[in-house]
Amino acid sequence: MRTAYRVETVRAAERALMARLPAGTLMARAAAGLAAACAELLRPRLYGARVVLLVGSGDNGGDALYAGARLARRGAAVTAVLLNEERAHPGGLAALRAAGGRAAGAAGAERLIARARLVVDGITGIGGRGGLRQDAAGPAAAAAEHGVPVVAVDLPSGVDADTGEVHGAAVRAALTVTFGAWKPGLLVDPARALAGEVRLVDIGLGPELPPEPDLVAFDDADAAALLPRPEAESDKYRRGVIGIAAGSARYPGAAVLTVGGALRGGAGAVRYAGPAGGGVIGRYPETLVSEGRPSEAGRVQAWVVGPGLGGGPEAAATVADVLAADVPVLVDADGLHSIDPERLRARSAPTVLTPHAGEAAALLGTSRDRVESARLASVSELAVRYGAVALLKGSTTLIAEPGPGGPEGRGRVLANTTGTPWLATAGSGDVLSGLIGALLAAGLAPLDAAALGAHLHGLAGRAAPVPPMASTVTEALPGVWAALSPRR
Ligand SMILES: NC(=O)C1=CN([C@@H]2O[C@H](COP(=O)(O)OP(=O)(O)OC[C@H]3O[C@@H](n4cnc5c(N)ncnc54)[C@H](O)[C@@H]3O)[C@@H](O)[C@H]2O)[C@@H](O)CC1
Ligand SMILES: [K+]
């Protein structure tokens, strides 16, 4: 599990740790980890390799300078571009010079960068505010222009560490070496996309960090631990019976895809209620289909409502009928057009909403751009306003629960990083809904079901033959499941 902490928490932990250690210890640890990562990138010829350090006026620049000194001692040709010559970290600068490195002003930065094999971004770390200032934006752009790989120190400069928002120019890194703990911004787009690969360097901060992180991302082991496993005495109800109200005369395929996601999500049985039963049976004869209202379909332990439902009063009536059931309900796609926050908050069983950015914007009464640029705030706001677990789809999917426990009285938030842009294909969201629905029916807590579903769906999107389509993503699920949890 990757656990991320906001800047104020990281700073408090650093203060507590620093108080027990000789001065400079943490920066030395950070610089050692950073230099090792740079040396690895420069393999097999570190000796003579031209490295440019972009050095801002804080400790982030200090990390870059001390790491540069280590690389210079091993024979690299290191030049520090000092963006603010008076305020560059004095100890770091002296160490670089003593190791044979050079320092230059910002004027010649582009020429140096054009000839470099590696640029180290030590402009700002957790002390950065807003996008890069103009003096820093130029050298950052030069690295991109000349195709020189950038290693970001702690964070790509210009991104917001706490939110992943990017307000202005920012560095695009191939690798980010972050210290002590992940920062939320490294898991949330648009910042995540600028961070490249992220490596965490242990500087001993762990024992000082609080038990509740601000943002969490599952690894495969976390997903594997949550996978439902049938017991010897399991029957279909113990494994979970899921009801699906999806599809319409106009969009029959959504019903088939949602049912497929549910079956491949391990449901004990799937009940389908709606007008597309014929197509569903044709593809998945194991489904129990009926044409009446969902409430007449028989006993289920969770519902999925919405994919391909179409609009209008009939769709709204179907959503209302499902929401009246006293079991967990996942609302997706067309189902999201007719939900009311008051009604959802009044439900006694949990609700899960799975919008993409456009649908989330409509639910929040804002613009799609605003949702995409402030994903963390948007997903938390959805969860709180609707009293539901909210899953905001995207290149990094975010999942938030309502209620106390997190920052500002909000609930826990999870980021899913297994996704791929290939999953942006028609019907892919229907498969995700069915999959999460099956996990809800199996009895997983809504936040876990949504996070596990997103994790599996992302892995399946990667495992499906390229180019994937919704049905091949569905068929990749068993392989993904088996890889996480070999059958007993
Ligand atoms: N506190 C600690 O114990 C440790 C801190 N470390 C490093 O120290 C960093 C934090 O250092 P600081 O608190 O000095 O802050 P930073 O170095 O992150 O940034 C602050 C400086 O950047 C300037 N700045 C702010 N926004 C800017 C912008 N948009 N464009 C250009 N310049 C801008 C400010 O004027 C200030 O001088 C961490 O990210 C990490 O790299 C590491 O050495 C590990 C230990
Ligand atoms: K940086």
Image (cartoon, helix red, strand yellow):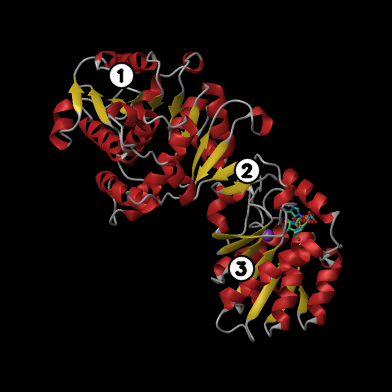
- Residue 487 circle label: none
* Picture mark count: 3
Q: Name the residue beneath numbered marker 3.
A: 142
Mark 2 CB in 8 Å range of ligand 1?
no
Quarter of the rendered image showing ligand 1: bottom right
Q: Residue placed farthest to the front in the image?
A: 232
69 left or right, relative to 378: right
Residue at screen point 80% across, 64% down: 25
Q: Gap in Å between the C-alphas at discs 2 and 3? A: 26 Å
Q: Gap in Å between the C-alphas at discs 2 and 1? A: 36 Å
Q: Name the residue beneath numbered marker 1.
A: 315
10 Å crowding of disc 1: few (<14), some (14-19), many (20+): many
Residue at screen point 36% across, 40% down: 229
For the residue marked with disc 3, what is the amino acid? Ala
* Vertical comparison of 57 with 319: above or below: below
Mark 1 or 3 closer to N-term?
A: 3
Which is in the foreground here, disc 1 or disc 3? 1
* Vertical comparison of 425 with 360: above or below: below
Q: Gap in Å between the C-alphas at discs 1 and 3? A: 53 Å
Mark 2: secondary structure: loop
For the residue marked with disc 2, what is the amino acid? Thr
Rendering coords of residue 328 (x, y %) = 41, 23
Mark 3: secondary structure: helix
Mark 2 or 3 closer to N-term?
A: 3
Which is in the foreground here, disc 2 or disc 3? 2
Mark 1: secondary structure: helix
323 left or right, relative to 114: left
Q: Is residue 154 visible?
A: yes
Q: Nearer the viewer, residue 316 or 458?
A: 458
Q: Is residue 83 visible?
A: no
Q: Nearer the viewer, residue 335 or 145?
A: 335
Q: Name the residue beneath numbered marker 2.
A: 163
